[in-house]
């Protein structure tokens, strides 16, 4: 609780907390707050401007944009959080493992990271999905693979920086087992930058998911994902700017929110930067 | 009875031999000083004794049990009996743990966490001036002296019989130095500890140690009871080291022996006596023959062809016999 208060007092922290909380609430309560069904087609009211009936207007099939954005938050958050959770866990395990292993093991793990990172992430994600097939589950798993080296590299570098520090050696002198040193002394001291990275990667995952959806390899229409909405909006940009604008704004809100949250979180997690409140 | 015996220890970093055949005996209840200039290998010896640095050769015997012969599990238990006070105590405290969890750490590691054990630790902490209000602080919120005492209590919570202190007074002003040394002395009697004190501060070593060993370039050149060694040093290096030490006592002030040259690299030690290139008394023999440590181990002994004292002091029993 004190951490939350502390977070909100940092620059951008209040906005970040507001944006991220709003997104989460909207995603969770989507069926309750959306004025229409996300896939309710009304051919009579295509591409309408914002009005009292449709606050943000309608798309090319007459579907309510607000409702689709609200359900889109679900897809965006669900996919990005699952991807980040999987790649963060695997990345930290591999990175810390590499840093504390003999040089040969370290080299193999770093080599794999290098191979994965040498492809542009969207291209690699595309290739993987093309091979293993589209669908929600596959997209989550395969995009996770693309992001593992992000976390792995930071975790490894951070671990190398602290692995010979006196407080780690003190634990060894006390007779602590390796798992204890890793869990209680290495991880808490390297996790700050990794959380920051996680928050900043969330928007990237959302973008990749959008790109995959556009190519029919991600979440498939008519399921509302911001990526699908952006692409629909792009197609009809000359007739109605609302869909592209509002889905872009949603993406921006999520991006800024998570990025600022990442920074505020970094300061809060580092007790040396924590102000005495 | 010896609390710890280090025998013919060799420590290598890749191809560099930092410590070459060092033997030490630490008797139960005594304070042994290990002195020498920076880079002589004294910290490597300390790290090897607490198990942070593997020995390339030699054995470590703790309370009569030789570590190298013990099964792995027993080895961990034995190694725990030796705790290290780090040179920078604040850096030896995990930055994201409160003092409470730091002090509970040894109990959790040894799986001996109980309310009674915790009460004992809190009482110990209070007895050396760490109040309960400090328990919820983080290391960066502690003063230097508090961090030092937290590190000390944590080391003691592991119930060691031997404490290795690496420059325990580094960076402390004189009054706090005295306080800390008195505290260490009190604890030694109360908890039945033996100390190995690594330092280059000869004033401190002269004041608190019972015996002292002098290291030069990875080897011990002279050792013996502190008072005797300080008064009648046999090895020219010891003499130079002592003469470099500032003293206000005019009667004890000696002619300053200034060593020329730098400490040679341990990767390429000089032939014969390792000290001959800097020794004011060096003779041709010193460049050829390696002097062996003569004298009874634990009593006065030195490694020099031309000692400043003709005979190693015979043990009293030898005279009687």
Image (tube, coloured by chain):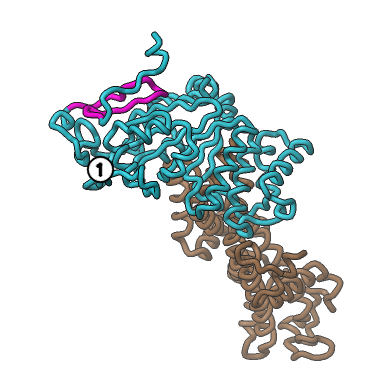
Chain colours: A brown, B cyan
Q: Nearer the viewer, residue A205 or A255?
A: A255
Which contiguous range is marked in magenta?
B289-307
The quadrant of the rendering that contains the C terminus of chain B is: top left
Q: Position of residue A73 (x, y in %)?
A: 73, 71
Q: Is residue B60 left or right of residue B306?
A: right
Q: Which residue is mark 1?
A: B264
* Residue at figure coordinates x 24%, y 35% from the top left: B274
Q: Is residue B30 left or right of residue A14?
A: left
Report if residue A215 is visible in the image.
Answer: no
Report if residue A67 is visible in the image.
Answer: yes
Q: Nearer the viewer, residue B249 or A107?
A: B249
Q: How many marks?
A: 1
| Snapshot quadrant of residue A277 | bottom right
Q: Are there few (<14), some (14-19), or many (20+) residues within 10 Å of tag 1? A: some
Q: Is residue A167 left or right of residue A14?
A: left
Residue at mark 1: chain: B
Residue extending farthest to the front is B251
């Amino acid at each position: 609780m004190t951490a939350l208060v502390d977070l909100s007092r940092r620059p951008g922290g209040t906005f970040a907390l507001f944006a991220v909380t709003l997104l989460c609430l909207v995603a969770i309560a989507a069926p309750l707050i959306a004025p229409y069904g996300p896939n309710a087609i009304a051919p009579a009211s295509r591409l309408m401007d914002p009005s009292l009936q449709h606050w943000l207007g309608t798309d090319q099939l007459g579907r309510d944009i607000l409702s689709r954005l609200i359900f889109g938050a679900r897809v965006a958050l669900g996919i990005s959080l699952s991807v980040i959770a999987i790649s963060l866990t695997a990345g930290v395990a591999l990175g810390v493992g590499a840093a504390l292993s003999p040089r040969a093991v370290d080299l193999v793990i770093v080599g794999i990271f290098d191979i994965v990172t040498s492809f542009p992430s969207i291209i690699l994600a595309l290739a993987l999905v093309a091979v293993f097939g589209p669908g929600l589950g596959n997209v989550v798993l395969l995009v996770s693979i693309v992001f593992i080296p992000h976390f792995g590299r930071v975790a490894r570098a951070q671990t190398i920086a602290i692995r010979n520090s006196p407080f780690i050696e003190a634990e060894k002198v006390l007779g602590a087992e390796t798992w204890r040193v890793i869990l209680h002394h290495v991880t808490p001291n390297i996790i700050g930058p990794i959380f920051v990275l996680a928050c900043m990667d969330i928007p990237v995952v959302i973008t990749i998911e959008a790109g995959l959806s556009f190519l029919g390899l991600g979440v498939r229409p008519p399921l509302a994902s911001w990526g699908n909405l952006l692409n629909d909006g792009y197609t009809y940009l000359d007739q109605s700017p609302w869909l592209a604008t509002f889905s872009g704004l949603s993406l921006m809100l999520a991006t800024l929110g998570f990025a600022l949250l990442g920074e505020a979180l970094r300061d809060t997690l580092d007790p040396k930067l924590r102000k005495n409140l | 009875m010896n609390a710890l015996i280090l025998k013919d220890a060799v420590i290598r970093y890749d191809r560099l031999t930092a410590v070459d055949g060092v033997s030490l005996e630490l008797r139960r209840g005594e304070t042994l000083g290990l002195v020498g200039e920076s880079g002589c290998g004294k910290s490597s010896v300390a790290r090897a004794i607490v198990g942070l640095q593997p020995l390339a050769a030699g054995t470590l015997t703790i309370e009569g049990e030789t570590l190298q012969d013990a099964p792995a599990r027993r080895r961990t238990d034995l190694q725990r009996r030796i705790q290290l006070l780090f040179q920078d105590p604040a850096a030896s405290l995990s930055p994201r743990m409160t003092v409470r969890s730091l002090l509970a750490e040894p109990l959790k590691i040894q799986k001996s966490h109980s309310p009674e054990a915790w009460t004992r630790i809190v009482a110990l902490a209070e007895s050396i001036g760490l109040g309960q209000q400090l328990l919820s602080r983080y290391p960066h919120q502690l003063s230097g002296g508090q961090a030092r005492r937290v590190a000390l209590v944590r080391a003691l919570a592991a119930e060691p019989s031997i404490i290795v202190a690496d420059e325990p007074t580094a960076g402390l002003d004189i009054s706090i130095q005295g306080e800390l040394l008195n505290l260490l002395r009190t604890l030694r009697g109360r908890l039945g500890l033996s100390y190995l004190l690594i330092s280059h501060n000869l004033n401190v070593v002269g004041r608190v140690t019972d015996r002292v060993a002098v290291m030069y370039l990875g080897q011990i050149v002279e050792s013996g009871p502190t008072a005797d060694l300080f008064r009648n040093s046999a090895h020219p290096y010891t003499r130079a080291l002592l003469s470099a030490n500032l003293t206000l006592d005019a009667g004890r002030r000696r002619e300053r022996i200034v060593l020329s040259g730098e400490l040679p690299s341990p990767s390429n030690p000089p032939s014969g006596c390792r000290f001959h290139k800097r020794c004011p008394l060096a003779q041709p023999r010193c460049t050829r023959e390696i002097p062996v440590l003569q004298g009874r181990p634990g009593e006065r002994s030195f490694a020099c062809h031309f000692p400043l004292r003709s005979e190693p002091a015979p043990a009293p029993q030898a005279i009687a016999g």
